[in-house]
Amino acid sequence: MITRTALPIDPQHPAFAGHFPGAPIVPGVVLLDEALHAIACATGLPLDACELRAVKFLSPLTPGVAVELVSEVQANGAIRFEILADQRKIATGSVLIGKTA
């Protein structure tokens, strides 16, 4: 099942102050944090032990742009995700919930 969720990224997030002052972009860690929390809420799965299988950042995101997370649980238990601004892919990846390092 494919899940679509809005990712609210606060345009006043404190990370913007140090992430390229004058020309801020959303740090990748902020995108991943929001995506993982949205996946946990949508699936009911805990994130206390998860493994990021792959993450690729494809396009920068500026503050204030609306972002959507599209995620899908795969047969192997991994959750594939895309972070989109309109139809532009910002990031893609996959996470396996319940794995330990």
Image: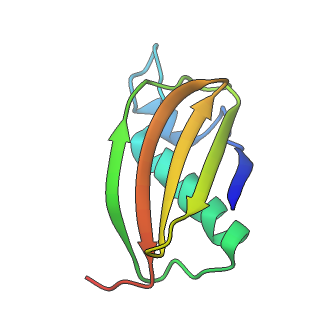
Q: Residue furthest left?
A: 101
| Residue pictured at 51% horizontal, 45% vertical | 31
Between residues 14 and 65, which one lies in front from this camera angle? 65
Nearest to the observer: residue 9 or residue 2: 2
Q: Determine the residue positioned at 43% across, 74% down.
A: 76
Q: Which quarter of the rendered picture does the N terminus lie within?
A: bottom right
98 over 17 or under it: above or below:
below
Which residue is pictured at 44% across the width and 43% down the height? Answer: 92
Residue 72 seen from this side: yes
Residue 92, above or below 73: above
Judged left or right of residue 8, residue 89 is left
Q: Position of residue 12 (x, y in %)?
A: 65, 34
Residue 26 seen in the current view: no
Q: In the current view of this chain or complex, which residue is farthest to the top?
A: 22
> Where does the image place residue 87, in percent across and percent down from the top left?
62, 24
> Which of these two is toward me, 69 or 34?
69
The residue sitting at the front extreme is 75
Q: According to the image, what is the colour scheme of the structure?
A: rainbow
Residue 86 image position (x, y, % from top left): 67, 24
**x, y (%) of residue 45?**
61, 80
- How many marks overall? 0
Q: Nearer the viewer, residue 24 or 6?
A: 6
Position of 81 with respect to 37 (left or right) is left
Residue lying at 57% horizontally and 82% vertically, measured from the top left: 46
Q: Which quadrant, please, contains the C terminus?
A: bottom left
